[in-house]
Image (tube, rainbow, N blue to C red):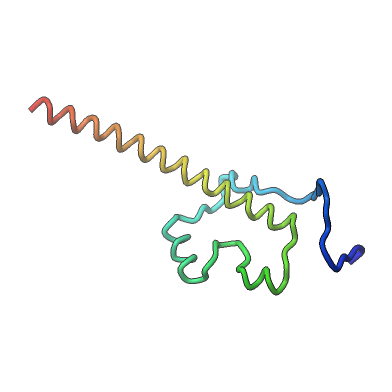
Amino acid sequence: YLFYVNGGILSKEVKVRTDWADYVFEKDYSLLPLDQVENFIKEKGHLPNTPSAKEVQNEGLELGKITTIQQEKIEDLFLHLIEMEKRLKKLEKENQALKAQIIKK
């Protein structure tokens, strides 16, 4: 390391230049279905593509890398929410159509 502190650091701002997670919005990005995410969490105890608590305790973490990973998870959530909203609107439309059929009878 070029700079090592054995103790706390107080700062008003820290700027880290790193990659970013916009690859999540690329067409070839493979968004894990939520059931696979759930199974991964049950098996591993943490989110896919994130370090476990034990890894962080043992190895620490790089701020830039973990920030990118967290952004990836935020973007994944938004993609899932967008998909769920589309499904909800479709179901609401189908529900309205079914209600209209019932009322006609």
- With 43 as the anchor, is 63 left or right in this view? right
The percent coordinates of residue 21 (x first, y second) are: 65, 49
For residue 80, above or below residue 95: below
* In the image: residue 43, left or right of residue 94: right
Work out whether residue 92 or residue 31 is closer to the camera in this orientation and state it: 92
* Quadrant of residue 42 within the rendered picture: bottom left
Q: Quadrant of the C terminus?
A: top left
Residue 75 at x, y = what percent?
Answer: 57, 46
Which residue occupies 22% across, 30% down? Answer: 97
Instruction: State the image coordinates of residue 77 (x, y, percent, origin top left).
Output: 52, 48
Residue at 83% over, 66% down: 7
Among all residues in the image, which is located at the extreme left?
105
Residue 51: x %, y % from top left: 63, 66
Residue visible at 51% across and 44% down in the picture:
79
From this view, report whether residue 38 is shown above or below residue 16: below
Number of numbered discs = 0
Left or right: residue 62 compared with residue 5: left
- Identify the residue at horizontal 66%, vertical 71% (top origin): 55
* Residue found at the very far top of the displayed protein: 104
Instruction: Indicate the quadrant where residue 84 lies.
Output: top left
Q: In the figure, 67 relative to 49: above or below?
A: above
Q: Nearer the viewer, residue 7 or 15?
A: 7
The quadrant of the rendering that contains the N terminus is bottom right
**Residue 47 as seen in the image, left or right of residue 23:** left
76 or 45: nearer the viewer: 45
